[in-house]
Image (spheres, rainbow, N blue to C red):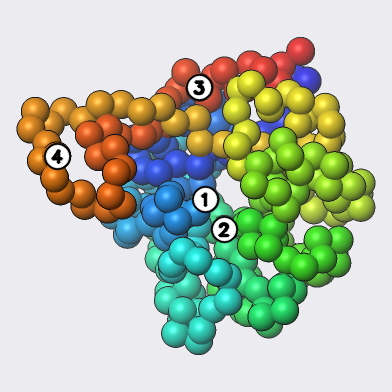
Amino acid sequence: MKREEFKVEVCANGVESCIAAQQGGADRVELCAGIPEGGTTPSYGEIKVARRVLTTTRLHVIIRPRGGDFLYTDLEMERMAADIAVCRELGVDGVVFGCLKTDGTIDVEKNRYLLECARGMSATCHRAFDRTCDAQQALETVIDLGFDRILTSGQQPRAIQGMDLLQRLNRQAAGRIILMAGSGVTEDNIRDIRQATGLNEFHFSGRESQPSAMQYVNPDLYMGRPGANEAALDYTTARRVRASIAALLD
């Protein structure tokens, strides 16, 4: 493939990862907090500084008030709409969200409301799509709603496992919407995913563990999940972004 024939989006867990993604040649970042929960809406300050440092890479922001399911209350919808308004105020290029109904179908009313809030910005339906009960029907609904793209692993834990469905969905979409492969995409499998599915957009984190600068760490205390390695920080590296892009080039 030629570089202009595909796009890569980096799942960035902070401004440091945004900078590395841009240095590595990413087309876009999806800025997220709460990575262990699958991504939640980052803070105002994180978005504002990311917007300042991203001069050549587009900035998309996940709109997800919590981890867990994608069934949202009216109060949660109010917060999501307010977060989209903040993204607009800060000059964000796009937002990423998805709402489901209790039966595992796309919630047309709630997604339409958020799409109206996001009018003028790019809109991606995130991996809520992977929890729908009928992917082919969900695809048609998301297309009808007017989303620009869908981030999906083919309803499997990793995109490499969902390649058959990704290929079928890409054929069904027939150019009416962009399908972007994500979850477990690395420099080692991105080319295989491209060849098996025909997709031209890819989403990955490209993170590497970096040791904390702390000289003392209390071994008996955890700020989060017990047993987690809190003496290291995970950030996207330009090296891994470049490697993933290189793997797609002819």
Decide which of tag 1 and tag 4 comes sooner along the chain.
1
- Circle 2 sits on which residue? 96
Location of residue 47 in the rendering, given as x and y in whole percent from the top left corner: 37, 52
Q: CA distance from mark 3 to mark 4?
A: 31 Å
User: Camera-side residue: 92 or 79?
Assistant: 79
Image quarter of the C terminus: top right
Amino acid type at circle 4 is: Pro
Does 170 sit above or below residue 209? below
Relative side of 96 to 130, left or right: left
- Circle 3 sits on which residue? 240
Decide which of tag 1 and tag 2 comes sooner along the chain.
1
Q: Residue furthest left?
A: 216
Decide which of tag 1 and tag 3 comes sooner along the chain.
1
Q: CA distance from mark 1 to mark 4?
A: 37 Å
- Circle 1 sits on which residue? 60
Location of residue 223 in the rendering, given as x and y in whole percent from the top left corner: 21, 52
Q: Residue at x 48, y 75 (%)?
A: 81
Q: Residue at x 55, y 69 (%)?
A: 69
Location of residue 206 in the rendering, given as x and y in whole percent from the top left corner: 50, 30
Image quarter of the N terminus: top right
